[in-house]
Amino acid sequence: MKAGIDLKITVTNEAAKWYKEEMALSDGDYLQFVVRLYGQSIHPNYSLGIEKSDQLHISIQTEVEGIIFYFEKEDDWFIKDYHLTVSLDGDEPSFHFEPMA
């Protein structure tokens, strides 16, 4: 993790199970949070996606239901000073950003 940057990720068990089933994931698989250059979020014109990937330069990670969710070092600026929670909103996962104190 970069000095001076607070990063935190929480993925609910329900959201992790949803990804595991929908993406046919196995224990030990990696899901990378990916910054996209379109959409709206906590940063204008940027949004957050997720894709199966091999870990390269992990900045922050959390393991839930056997799946490792992570940010690459080049993308961790996206959640600088935020706590990201991934949960189910109805039948789909959603990203919630809460400023860290």
Image (cartoon, helix red, strand yellow):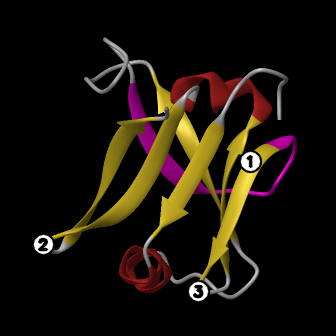
Q: Does the stretch in magenta take in 95?
A: no
What whole-number distance in Å separates the C-alpha atoms at marks 2 and 3?
A: 20 Å
Q: Taking 65 as reference, is 11 above or below it?
A: above
Residue behind mark 3: 65
Q: Taking 26 as reference, is 12 above or below it?
A: above
| Tag in front: 2 or 1 | 1
Q: What secondary structure is marked by label 2?
A: loop
Q: Taking 69 as reference, is 20 above or below it?
A: below
Q: Does the stretch in magenta take in 56?
A: yes
Q: Which residues are magenta?
A: 47-58
Residue 93 on image: x %, y %: 30, 63
Residue that extends furthest to the front in the rendered view of this protein = 101
User: Mark 1 and 3 residues: CB-CB less than 8 Å, in contact?
Assistant: no
Camera-side residue of 98 and 27: 98
* Among the two numbered marks 2 and 1 on one chain, the one whose residue lies closer to the N terminus: 1
Residue 11: mark: none
Residue 70 on image: x %, y %: 67, 53
What whole-number distance in Å separates the C-alpha atoms at marks 2 and 1?
A: 27 Å
Q: Amino acid at mark 2?
A: Gly
Camera-side residue of 83 and 65: 83
Q: What secondary structure is marked by label 1?
A: strand
Q: Taking 9 as reference, is 30 above or below it?
A: below
* Residue density around tag 2, few if under 14, some if 14–19, many if 20 or more, within 10 Å: few
* Among the two numbered marks 2 and 3 on one chain, the one whose residue lies closer to the N terminus: 3
Residue behind mark 1: 60
Residue ID at (49%, 35%): 100
Q: What secondary structure is marked by label 3?
A: loop
Residue behind mark 2: 90
Q: Quadrant of residue 87?
A: bottom left
> The N terminus appears in which quarter of the rendering?
top right
